[in-house]
Structure formats: structure tokens, C-alpha cells
Amino acid sequence: MNENGVCMACLWHEKKSTIDWEFRSQQLHRIAAWARSTSRSSWHCVLGVSGGKDSLWQAHQLRDHYGLNPLLVMYVSSDVTELGRMNAENMVRCGFTVHSIQPNPRIAVKLARKSFFEHGNIAKFSELALFTAPFRTAIEHNIPLVFFGENAALENGDTNTENPGWDASGIRYSNTLAGAAHEIWLDEANGIRREDLIPYTFPHASELQEWGGRGVFMGYFLNWSGWNNAVFSIGHGMTPHSLDYEDLGMHYKHHSLDSNNGAAVNFLMKYIKFGFGEATEHASYDVRANRITRKEAIALVKRLDGKCNPKLIKDFCSWIDITEESFWEIANSYRGTMWRQDTRGEWHLKKPIWYGMNDIDTIETQSVIERIDTIHRGQSLTPQESQTRRRHAIL
Ligand SMILES: [Zn+2]
């Protein structure tokens, strides 16, 4: 938050409207030309993908607008769902080559346990693999350019990164990855050996230097929105969640498809730690984009934030082999100071965002959701859009 109480994400949103996007797009064209002339491989670039809404849109942009031949590199989590697999398959059907790496699941479980116990963040170890795989693949295949999507540091105000906004090679300095060097995860007594951590070990500075390539965040050059990308991707065959909004704790079904059941649990952990969950995050994007009013956003938050289908928690517990009792014991040990516990032991936010708003329950949240539904929009594309879709889908 700045001195006026405005958060970094809102400041970034304001700043985006002052950026010369045409100029930045030209910059990206120049980078693309550089990659085409520099690459010693038949691939011009690597794009780190998850199979989700942003991946598919980015891949189409690189190929169809920037004239690149991208190799899509995907890290597959060891608890990947059927939905995650279907959406990876869909990227291939759209005419792309996907190179995927799924690290040893026995080690992944140990890392997930460690991540959850020691950091209260089950995604911490997998984020390492997510950023490592595209760079390692590019180095191995002599491909000079690596693309990622958004620079979370810019969007969320993680100011610890030492980069100018587009440079993804500096990603190893970010908060997400900082202190996450493989030394932290090394645990020989627990059967986590150095060689087990190769998929999670970001290339050394000297390896990057020898490779001589670049890592670039596309979000710096292109003014996109997750919502638009979702509409595009659903129109291009991406399958959204079939779970209910209450199961997911948010009002969209297009988010975090790529990852596992653990994703919803991770949102729950965020809610426990910081007092806001995934509904708050998406409702904030919706307010900034004028899709809904602030009051409607608050009603959505009240209905959905922090909700998580108990089955997803159960699945997560059985994956990392802990009881639900110990799950809650650990989760509660990370609870932030915005929570209070009542006499029956239940937790409540001391001052939720709807505090003092008596009329918030009069808002019909279901009709708000239907109005902004990306599934419906994605499935009702214009004739021109569906033509593009047919051209791209090799079925
Ligand atoms: Zn804000």
C-alpha cells in the first residue's frame, strides 16, 4: 500500500493506461526478429506454459502475430488432474509442440510436505520447477529466447526483483524464488538428494552467461487481461472446471486448471495467512476493469472467499500423507492476526470487507456471475473468431 492506502496492483493498473503499448509491441517484434536470426535451433523461442488461459493466448500471439516458432515447455505437477492433462492436449491440438517434464513424484511429495510444513505454501517448490524447466530446455536446445507470461513482481508489487520489468532472467531474485535455492530443499536424511533437485534448480549465472540468451516477460510488452485470455482460450478448446464456485472459492471456472487439486488448497492457505482469498483477487480485477461495481465485488467476496470443497482438502492430505487433523493444525499455525476464534473454536475475520454494510446481502451474486461469465462468452465467439479457431485447431 502507498501512503494514500492504494495497493500496488491498483497503482500498476493505473500505470498501464499511460503506457505506449504500440511502441512496446514494436519492441517485441524486434526481439522476435533477433530470435529468428540468432537461433541455432529450428525453434525460435521457448514459452513456459501451464495449459491454462494465458498459455494458449500467448502461444497464439507468438506464432500468429510475432512470426515465431515456439517450443512450449510445461512442468507437470505430480498430482496433475485429468482436466490439466486435457488442456495440455488441447494446446497440441491447436498446432503447437509441447515439451513436458514431470519430475519424480516420490520426491515431489516430499517437497510438497516440506513446502507445506515449513512455509504454509504448498506451491513454493513447484514454482521453482515452473521457472527452471523453460530455461533448462532453452539451454539444452540452443534456443536463444525464453518467454514467460506476467511478471508477478510488477502486478503485485513484489519489489524485490532487480529487473527492468521485461527481463525474466532476473527471476531468480524474486520473492517467490528467493531463498528457494536447492540447498534449502536438500535433505539427505529424508531421501532428497542433490540429483533429485535438478528440475528445481535454476541454472547458475555462469550457465546463463554461456548460453547468452534472454528471458522475457510477455506481460511487459502486451496489454492483456486474464479475463480476455480466458474468453479466447475457452473459444479455442480449453476446458474449464466443472466444480461449483463454492468448491473453488472464486467466481470463475477458468482459473488454475493447469495445476492440481492443491491449487484450491493453496488459495485457502492464502486466505488463512492474509485474510483474503481468490475471490478477492478476481473481484479486484473485475472492479478495475469496470466489469462489476465495488459493492458487487464485496458481495462475491462474502459469498465465496476462502471456500474450498472438503474433498479437495482430503485429496491433498492423502497426496502428502497427513491426516486432516494435522492439516488444520498446521494451517492454523499460519493464521494471520486478522482472525479471531469464537468459543466454539471457529475462526472469523475480525473486520471483513463487508463489515458495516447492511445491504450487501440484497445483491444477487448469481446474476453478477452470469453477467461476467467467461465460459459463456468463450463459447459464443463471433464468426471471425470461430474461423480463427477452426484454422488453428487440427482435429
Ligand atoms: Zn487495490
Image (cartoon, rainbow, N blue to C red):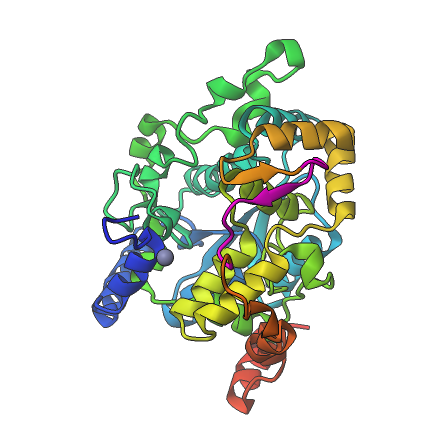
* Residue drawn at point x = 61 percent, y = 25 percent: 117
- Please say whether residue 307 is one of the residues in the magenta stretch: no
Residue 375, quarter of picture: bottom right
**Segment colored magenta:** 343-354
Q: Quadrant of ligand 1?
A: bottom left
* Residue drawn at point x = 54 percent, y = 21 percent: 185
Q: Position of residue 100 (x, y in %)?
A: 60, 46
As rendered, which of 275 and 214 lies closer to the eye? 275
* Residue drawn at point x = 53 percent, y = 38 percent: 273
Q: Is residue 316 left or right of residue 227?
A: right
Quadrant of the drawing holding the C terminus: bottom right
Residue 292 against residue 269 in the figure, above or below:
below
As rendered, which of 2 and 220 lies closer to the eye? 2
Specify whether residue 40 is in view: no
- Please say whether residue 350 is one of the residues in the magenta stretch: yes
Q: Position of residue 327 (x, y in %)?
A: 70, 31
Q: Position of residue 215 (x, y in %)?
A: 34, 46
| Residue that protrudes farthest toward the top in the picture | 189
